[in-house]
Image (cartoon, rainbow, N blue to C red):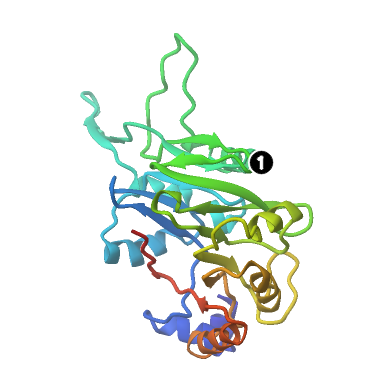
Amino acid sequence: MRCVLAQNCAVCLEAHTNPDSKNRRLNPSLLVRNLKTDTNVLIDCGKTFREAALRIFPKIGVSAVHSLVLTHDHADALLGMDDLREVQAHVETVDPVTKELYKIPPEAMKVHCSEPTSHGVIDKFPYLIDNEPPAGEAAPKPFRWTAKLQIDAFTPWEPFEACSIKFLPFPVIHGAGYTSFGFEFGFEVGARFVYISDVSEIPEDTCAFLNDKSKPPIDVLLIDALYLEKYHSTHMNLQKVMEEIATIRPKRTLLTGMSHDFDYPTHSIEVSKMGEEKGLNIEMTYDGLCIAFH
């Protein structure tokens, strides 16, 4: 926003004025679709979720989200959760006295997150959490239409299921003293998809996991790259990412979370060439990119 208001950044101005620009980047997020069950898992629901859903969901025929997975509790990962009411199934009833229309979700949407992140969710959105009343106590009457959510805290390195899809959570460092989570999924279709949206450093246990040569190679690694060269205390830059993927050697690497350092028409080509020089397939993502596994 600052760049557009100051009119001093060509990348941001192009993204703002061109609705189809691949430089127009919202908060990192991923929709994992189970086409067999026609259900959708959303990874992260940041402050730009509403805009992302309105831009992308109609193009891919999506109108509902059935489960939420959170990487961490920063604003770019969860401050859009109030808008989940728009994509959660609900039933409509009319109050016989007031004639007010109630939209009530029949069941809670699971929110899969770490224990620390669960506290952040409850602190920020206490009115969304489906806390069952004690036995014998009447449930409070709903006064407003909201999403209905239920926390399901995961344990690092222990798989959990969301919409019949298995996710393996693993820790990464997102600035000193703060843990975010990455996830591996794709087991059901014999693929390895690894998602690491917010990372400044990969801890030893996670590094060993990602570099384990006894396992099949990672098919797709989607990883954080904020700047080209500049240092940032909570995110990797392109140089650091290149060092990591040179040892991990995934079949395909997708960069996410890029700042205005990256101009898609120019740097998508440069990034690809950098990868080719090391025998790697590296691409910049863009909002709306779809990847299929069968």
Up/down of 81 relative to 217, above or below? above
Name the element at disc 1: helix
139 or 234: nearer the eye? 234
Q: Let me know if residue 173 appears in the view.
A: no
Q: Residues within 10 Å of mark 1 (few under 14, many from 20)?
A: few
Q: Amino acid at mark 1?
A: Pro
156 or 4: nearer the eye? 156
Quarter placement of the N terminus:
bottom right
Up/down of 276 relative to 162, above or below? below
Quarter placement of the C terminus:
bottom left
- Which residue corresponds to the image point at 61% horizontal and 39% vertical from the top-left? 123
155 or 15: nearer the eye? 155
Is 186 left or right of 208, judged from the image as shown? left
- Which residue corresponds to the image point at 36% horizontal and 63% vertical from the top-left? 292
- Which residue corresponds to the image point at 60% horizontal and 70% vertical from the top-left? 249
Up/down of 47 relative to 238, above or below? above
Q: Report which residue position mark 1 lands on.
A: 116
On the image, the x and y values in percent for residue 172 come to 68, 55
Q: Let me know if residue 76 appears in the view.
A: yes
Quadrant in which residue 88 is drawn: top left
On the image, the x and y values in percent for residue 164 come to 39, 41
